[in-house]
Image: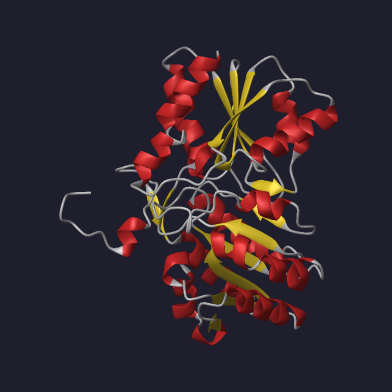
């Protein structure tokens, strides 16, 4: 940040896209509008964060099906539960931290226990903002993984989001989407990829290393794989957009080998993708060592997003360095 320059809120809630990278504007908002045109049961709600969860796109297209609940996350999800009880399909958006920390009990008992079709949309998951611990949802997956009936989706890019939204609407139970908003990179279109709820996908093969990733870290894993090829290291990348239910068959088929295995996640190493993969491997009797690349078990600093990703090990350069150190 240049001295004397005051960043606006929109600048502080930064995009993780690389300079010059192909992006799609507000893929969630536009996908929800398209889904709502086909299904008149779909409604949208937010807790005073429509602009920052791309829900404003839906609000403009369907003002009579949009509900602004104000700064009241418990009310947001309680109302969404009531709407689902009547047969509607709510998508309720707020920041991930507010859904996971502030409204957990309402999501658990009002939505998950009766297994209602409510789609919780959480903006700023993991380290996607420089605002610090009040807005960095570094432990949201750990919080939500223990909730029965809840499906958890951590999309990589705009392709994932656009294809996931209609599947989430059709899924009969509750879901939690770790939303990437604003100008979202478009990555997976180059890998003959289709999002399937509950399925992991092998995006590229590799004889030396396996990177198992979710969320924006799949983009970074693919970038790291290309750079590691320059070091004559052949890297496979397995994208796991659905964290729960976990596609153990696809992932463990890659883990059970003599290759170096690492997980990559935009989440604390406690309770997220790493422990999901490791737990599944232990239950299957697979003894392969698995190395986590993720956020440390601590409250993180505030600052510029690229600086924070480098500091906490999420940058492509840090992934490359970690792999080379482990080989």
> Residue 276's x, y, as percent?
71, 39
> Residue 49's x, y, as percent?
46, 71
Quadrant in which residue 268 is drawn? top right
Farthest residue in the front direction? 298
Q: Is residue 288 visible?
A: yes
Q: Is residue 162 left or right of residue 176?
A: left
Would you place residue 299 above or below residue 11 in this image? above
Q: Is residue 196 visible?
A: no
Number of numbered labels in the structure image: 0
Q: Nearer the viewer, residue 54 or 292?
A: 292
Farthest residue in the left direction? 4
Quadrant in which residue 178 is drawn? bottom right
Query: Which of the image's four quarters has the C terminus?
Result: top right
Q: Is residue 159 left or right of residue 166?
A: left
> Residue 9's x, y, as percent?
33, 63
Residue at left 71%, top 76%? Answer: 81
> Residue 48's x, y, as percent?
47, 76
Would you place residue 132 above or below residue 92 in this image? above
Chosen colour scheme? secondary structure
Quadrant in which residue 73 is drawn? bottom right
Residue at left 54%, top 55%? Answer: 161
């Amino acid at each position: 940040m240049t001295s004397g320059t005051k960043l606006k809120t929109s600048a502080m809630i930064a995009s993780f896209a690389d300079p010059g990278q192909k992006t799609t504007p507000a893929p969630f908002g536009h996908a929800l509008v398209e889904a709502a045109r086909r299904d008149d049961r779909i409604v949208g709600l937010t807790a005073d964060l429509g602009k920052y969860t791309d829900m404003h796109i839906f609000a403009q297209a369907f003002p009579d099906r949009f509900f602004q609940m104000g700064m009241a996350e418990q009310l947001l999800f309680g109302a969404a539960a009531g709407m689902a009880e009547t047969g509607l399909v709510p998508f309720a958006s707020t920041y991930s931290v507010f859904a996971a920390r502030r409204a957990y009990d309402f999501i658990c008992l009002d939505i998950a226990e009766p297994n209602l079709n409510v789609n919780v949309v959480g903006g700023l998951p993991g380290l996607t903002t420089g605002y610090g611990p009040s807005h960095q949802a570094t432990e949201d997956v750990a919080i939500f993984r223990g909730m029965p009936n809840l499906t958890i989706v951590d999309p990589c890019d705009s392709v994932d989001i656009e294809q996931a939204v209609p599947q989430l609407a059709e899924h009969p139970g509750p879901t939690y989407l770790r939303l990437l908003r604003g100008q979202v990179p478009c990555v997976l279109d180059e890998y003959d990829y289709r999002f399937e709820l509950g399925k992991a996908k092998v995006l590229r093969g590799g004889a030396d290393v396996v990177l198992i990733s979710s969320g924006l870290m799949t983009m970074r894993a693919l970038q790291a794989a290309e750079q590691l090829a320059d070091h004559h290291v052949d890297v496979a990348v397995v994208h796991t957009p659905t964290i729960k239910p976990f596609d153990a068959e696809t992932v463990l088929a890659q883990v059970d080998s003599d290759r170096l295995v690492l997980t990559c996640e935009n989440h604390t190493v406690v309770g997220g993708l790493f422990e999901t993969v490791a737990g599944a491997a232990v239950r299957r009797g697979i003894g392969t060592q698995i190395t986590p690349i993720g956020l440390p078990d601590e409250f993180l600093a505030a600052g510029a997003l690229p600086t924070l990703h480098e500091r906490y090990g999420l940058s492509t350069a840090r992934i490359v360095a970690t792999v080379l150190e482990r080989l």
